[in-house]
Amino acid sequence: WLSLQEGISVNPILQSFQKTVNQFNIDKALIESFFYSMRMDLRKTSHDLDSYNQYIYGSAEVVGLMCLKVFCKGNQIEYDQLAPFAKKLGMAFQKINFLRDLEDDSVNKGRQYFPSLQEDRLTADVKAQIEKEIHQDFKQAFNGIRMLPSNAKLGVYCAYCYYVELLNKIQRSTIGDLLQNRIRVTNSRKLFLMLSAVLKVRFNQV
């Protein structure tokens, strides 16, 4: 916080951080929410609906909002218009992360993020409901991606395509699969997705 106030730090990482925050006028409340969610991981191993939503907001939605501040370069009207979509995209990404990392979180760390689990275990019905929610989040987020400034659209769309592919693989996986392996997208598939995204953005299909 001192580096943000003083506008300088001898630590190169903090210097880059404070410079970005001050240059693009990133709301300090977003940063506070992020650190609050990170601290939750130190003391919580399960969540109810309220803490789950709070964790996702601080760990994912605000990251999308901070990135959006950079993308919009001070255009507050554009930022306000795109903010709901950025939050939806961050929300979708984080829910996929929870499913992808189920093995490490539940087996190795004893941590469950999803609320209302039966005996702290993810069931097929709950998994299907979460996947349905993610698809809805993605559907709304895609509308925002189409409205992004041209300098930011490709990078965000590439990330979107990667996570959609990851979600599709997770949907084809059983809970047993998720508890035994971390679902991944192969490097060759990543390359294909990136090239496809480049062409779609270049020819205004996004």
Image: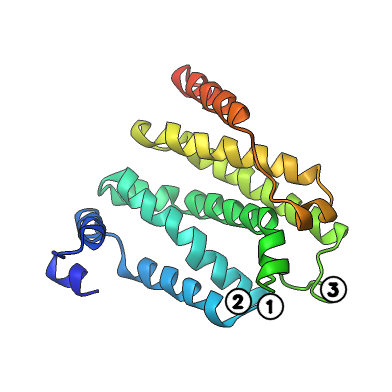
Residue type indicated by callout 3 = Gln
Real-space Cα distance between discs 1 and 3?
12 Å
The answer to which image quadrant residue 56 occupies is: bottom right
Residue for badge 1: 48
> Residue visible at 33% across and 49% down?
77
Q: Is residue 27 left or right of residue 43?
A: left
Q: Is residue 113 visible?
A: no
Residue at 60% in and 52% down: 92
- Cα distance, mark 2 to mark 1? 6 Å
Q: Amino acid at mark 1?
A: Asp
Q: Measured along the vertical axis of the image, is residue 33 above or below residue 128?
A: below
Q: What distance separates the C-alpha of mark 3 from that of mark 2?
A: 17 Å
Name the residue beneath numbered marker 2: 51
Camera-nearest label, 3 or 2: 3
Task: Tell me the kind of residue under disc 2.
Answer: Ser
The x, y position of residue 151, in whole percent, is 34, 33
> Which residue is drawn at the image coordinates 81% and 64% (left, top)?
122
Instruction: Count residues near mark 3 (Cα–Cα under 10 Å), then give few for <14, some for 14-19, many for 20+.
Output: few
Q: Are marks 1 and 3 in contact (CB under 8 Å)?
A: no
Q: Determine whether 97 is above or below 28 in the image.
A: above
1 or 3: mark nearer the eye: 3
120 with respect to 166 (left or right): right
Q: Which residue is mark 3?
A: 118
**Residue 169 in view here:** yes
Q: Counting residues from the N terminus, which is met first, the one under dot 3 or under dot 2?
A: 2
In depth, the one of 71 and 77 nearer the eye is 71
Q: Secondary structure at mark 1?
A: loop
